[in-house]
Amino acid sequence: MVEDLAAKFEKGEVTIPASLTQLRRELEHFEYDVTARGNVRYHAPEGEHDDCVDSLALAARAGGMVSSTW
């Protein structure tokens, strides 16, 4: 889901208005690591949140639910 969201950002299919400061903050701090088994794990750093990022990724995955004209 996260890779799909990143691709939609790159294609300009998803944009974030400046007024959505919490979402912008979460996106800026969102990170990943690779587990010992080679799996990628996406998450917010300690003390941060990623609920808004997760919600946006789910909406983008649902298709047609995310508008760049908010």
Image (spheres, rainbow, N blue to C red):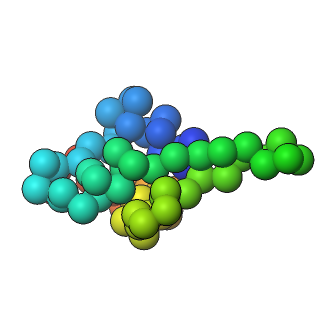
Residue 28 position within the rendered picture, expressed as x and y whole percent measured from the top left: 35, 45
Q: Residue at x 59, y 46 (%)?
A: 32
Q: Furthest-top residue in view?
A: 11
**Total number of numbered labels?**
0
Residue 23 position within the rendered picture, expressed as x and y whole percent measured from the top left: 29, 58
Left or right relative to 56: residue 67: left
Does residue 1 appear in the picture of this structure? no
Q: Residue at x 47, y 39 (%)?
A: 6
Q: Furthest-right residue in view?
A: 37
Residue 59 position within the rendered picture, expressed as x and y whole percent measured from the top left: 43, 63
Compared to 23, does 35 lie above or below? above
Does residue 35 appear in the picture of this structure? yes
Q: The C terminus appears in which quarter of the rendering?
A: bottom left
Compared to 10, does 65 lie above or below? below
Left or right relative to 18: residue 67: right
Q: Residue 64 versus residue 55: which sits nearer the camera?
A: 55
Q: Residue 33 versus residue 8: which sits nearer the camera?
A: 33
Left or right relative to 56: residue 15: left
- The image quadrant that residue 47 belongs to is bottom left
Compared to 31, does 62 lie above or below? below
Q: Residue at x 28, y 53 (%)?
A: 25
Q: Residue at x 55, y 57 (%)?
A: 43
Residue 5 position within the rendered picture, expressed as x and y whole percent measured from the top left: 48, 46
Q: Residue 30 versus residue 63: which sits nearer the camera?
A: 30
Q: Furthest-front residue in view?
A: 46
Compared to 19, does 13 lie above or below? above
